[in-house]
């Protein structure tokens, strides 16, 4: 059994993306195991109680929520002071993970929710994004000119929402939000966390992520 932490992940999943961001920021080396969500390997299902990514096994312990993985990593090492953030940042993360993510899903997968008005759901998501745009005025990150865990936790979901209709997204009057998202997607950190790996299978040589 590997003595290194093992991270089960799916490249495009925003929850897995933010877990990888925090692990990279903390400088923690993990064995990365990419999976296909339509073909989950038994070893992954034995690890993750919820059968969802990301899932991290470290020191005999399993962390099955992306927020828990982020905190676990940054509490060990936080050279960028990402955890140095006002309480409002945690409130933003809660809103992102709750009402905004629900509205995002209802917009992106509208055909799965025929009982809901897709336009109204997009408007709910838009209200949150407009608040982020207001917060970003005159600064590069949500709480000033350095990122915090809130930036890492929220940006992958803003990217997912933007990609549901990027033409429409770029036409909206939220210039600071667009600039914030573009800085993220054009960054070296984004390129590193989005490296493509072949799906893991038993007996494969390990793929390493991080330092």
Image (cartoon, helix red, strand yellow):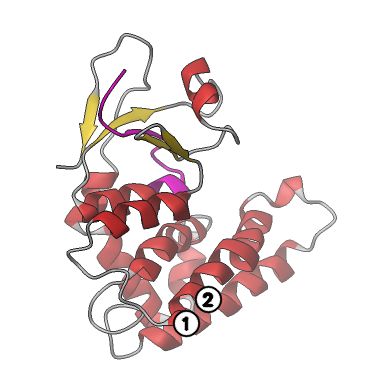
Relative side of 96 to 124, left or right: left
Query: Percent x, y for residue 109?
Result: 66, 49
Residue drawn 59% across and 79% down? 127
**Is 151 above or below relative to 25?**
below
Query: Magenta span has 11?
Result: yes
Horizontally, residue 204 falls left or right of residue 66, namely left
Question: Do the CB atoms of the residues marked 2 and 1 lie less than 8 Å apart?
Answer: yes
Q: Which mark is residue 91?
A: 2
Pick the front one: 196 or 62: 62
Q: Residue at x 38, y 39 (%)?
A: 11
**Residue 14 shown in magenta:** yes
Hey, which quadrant is residue 174 in on the image?
A: bottom left
Determine the residue positioned at 44% across, 64% down: 154
Q: Which mark is residue 167?
A: none
Residue drawn 85% across the image and 55% down it? 115
Count of marks overlaid on the render: 2
Q: Position of residue 107 (x, y in %)?
A: 65, 58
Magenta residues, as a range? 1-17
**Image x and y of residue 81, in percent:** 23, 70
Q: Which one is in front, 171 or 144?
A: 144
The residue to which callout 1 is attached is 88
The C terminus appears in which quarter of the rendering?
Answer: top left
Residue 107 versus residue 100 in the image, above or below: above
């Amino acid at each position: 059994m590997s003595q290194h932490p093992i991270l089960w992940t799916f490249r495009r999943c925003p929850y897995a993306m933010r877990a990888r961001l925090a692990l990279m920021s903390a400088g923690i080396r993990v064995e990365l195991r990419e999976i296909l969500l339509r073909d989950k390997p038994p070893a992954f299902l034995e690890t993750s109680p919820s059968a969802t990514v990301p899932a991290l096994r470290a020191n005999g312990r399993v962390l099955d929520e992306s927020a828990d993985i982020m905190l676990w990593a940054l509490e060990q090492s936080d050279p960028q002071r990402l955890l140095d953030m006002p309480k409002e940042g945690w409130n933003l993360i809660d809103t992102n993970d709750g009402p905004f993510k629900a509205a995002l899903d209802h917009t992106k997968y509208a055909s799965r929710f025929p009982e809901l008005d897709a336009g109204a759901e997009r408007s709910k998501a838009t209200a949150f994004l407009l608040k982020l745009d207001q917060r970003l005025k005159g600064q590069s990150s949500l709480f000033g000119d350095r990122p915090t865990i809130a930036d890492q936790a929220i940006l992958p979901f803003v990217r997912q929402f933007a990609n549901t209709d990027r033409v429409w997204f770029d036409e909206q009057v939220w210039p600071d939000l667009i600039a914030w998202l573009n800085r993220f997607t054009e960054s070296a950190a984004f390129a590193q966390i989005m490296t493509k790996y072949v799906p893991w299978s038993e007996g494969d040589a390990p793929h390493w992520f991080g330092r």
